Amino acid sequence: MKALLSVKCKEELKENKILVPQTLKSWEVSSVAFGTFQIPCEPSYHSGSSLYLSKKIFQDLNLPYEGNIHLFIHEKVLHLGPLIGIFTAGFTNSIIRPIGERTLFFSKLLSMEKKVGAYVFLFGANHINWEDGTMEGYMFTEKGWCRKTLPFPHVVYDRLPNRRTEKHKLLTEAREKIQKDYSIPWFNPGFFNKWDIHKKLMIEESIVSFLPETNDKVTIETLERFLSDYSFIYLKPVNGSLGLGLYKIIYNRDEQLYYVRYKNEESKNKLQRFPSLEALLGTVLKNKDLTTYLVQQGISLLKANDSHVDFRVHTNKDEKGNWIVSALAAKLSGKGSVTTHRNSGGVVKTIPELFPKEEDQKEVIDKLTNASLLISEAIDRHLPGFIGEIGFDFGLDKEKRVWLFEANSKPGRSIFYHPKLRNEDMLTRKLSIEYAVYLTEKSLQHPDGVFL
């Protein structure tokens, strides 16, 4: 059972006293808890709608401030929260910009706490005090950023910025210890591996039709075979993101030449031609480990204004743990670019901007929604741990058949720079907090941590 109400400190209450609304009298309460802190208490009841705690209990629980939050009851323990820790890295010494360039994103994310009813804070591995079971968390209030000493949270939301950081020994040890020793649910751990995701989705009969042919053996023979079957192909890094390290290869049969389009180390779009695949690989990819690449069928995409179009779809779990589509937008490629990413000159469009006719809008939205929900549920079934959000890159070919290009466990948010996608921006952030409420309730009901 849970309730959402205001929690306040009442100085005149005796040390072990709490005042509970009469409407919750059926809840038997013998102690009150916040995060991993728990204190015995003596409840009394009143006709109001707020929960009042004595000053001592309020301080001993390390509650950061009064506010509207959720109450959960389990085995006579009244849990206040949820207390949600967002795990990341890259902290600075500035209290104004504690996460550097990502500070704005995190301030927007944490500002959702009051809309949902939760306490949310940022922390890194260096902010954990293992001996006394507390964390030095960064919270975002009306007055800006501040640091608070807090108990270990009910739930951890993983927002590590990249794969390299994720592999850092100190961060890996902190994650494992929190999950193993404290049974705290940790959601969105890790970055997806393209080949791993592809293999898992290939066994799902309802999803195979969305998957371009893909192979993890990048050899001359494989490339030749793909180029004989398809008008062009892609080489993709297994662990790549943002279109980095992507190569588009075309074989011109009339000229008997191989063309490759890519972005070089100076972030400039390049187009080169070669007499053979051996020459292409030996020049453009000479310093690359091809065992870390995939070869994938190219798809002739829908075009608008001479630009190729693909689609970004965000899915999130809601407060009931169900997958929903939270954002959907089109992306147009920049001139000479292999991808539609903004950093390559790509442009974001809403679906109505791209398809003026309502029937076309509905067809595209329905197809992408159906595909993204089916694939979200499949990934959730096949991967361990708790997944709360996924970002998909889809394509539509000229017959409007849906193709999945990529699934991202920590999706970028560049589409939300579009002024007409501000509501979707807010919704995705709100849903992340709401899913943490869901995980908190489930983990309290099943303290062993196994409830999916």
Image (tube, helix red, strand yellow):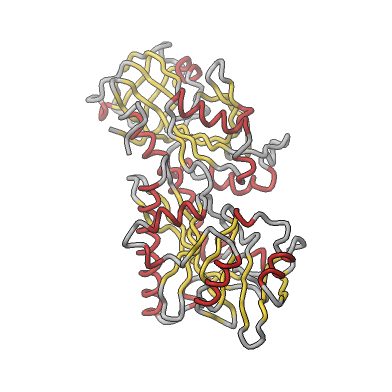
Mark count = 0
Q: In this view, does 206 lie above or below 111?
A: below
- Spot occupied by residue 69 in the image (x, y as percentages of width and height): 41, 34
The answer to which image quadrant residue 269 occupies is bottom right
Q: Which image quarter holds the N terminus?
A: top left
Residue nearer the viewer, 21 or 418: 418
Q: Which residue lies furthest to the right in this view?
A: 266
Q: Give me the residue at 72% from left, 74% from top.
A: 272
Q: Is residue 12 toward the left or the right of residue 129 in the image?
A: left
Q: Residue furthest left?
A: 26
Location of the C terminus by quadrant is top left
Instruction: Give 61 or 44, whichever is nearer the viewer.
Output: 61
Task: Work out whether 398 lies above or below 295.
Answer: below
Q: In this view, does 301 lie above or below 384?
A: below
Residue 238 spot, x, y in % from top left: 56, 54
Extreme residue in the front direction:
221
Please indicate whether residue 312 sits to the left or right of residue 96 in the image: left
Q: Where on the picture, by quarter, is residue 237?
A: bottom right
Residue 71 coordinates in the image, percent (x, y):
35, 31
Position of residue 266 measured from the top left corner of the image (x, y, whole percent): 77, 62
Q: Residue at x 49, y 16 (%)?
A: 60
Q: In which quarter of the image is residue 244?
A: bottom right
> Quick one: which residue is furthest to the bottom in this view?
254
Front-most of residues 168 and 434: 168
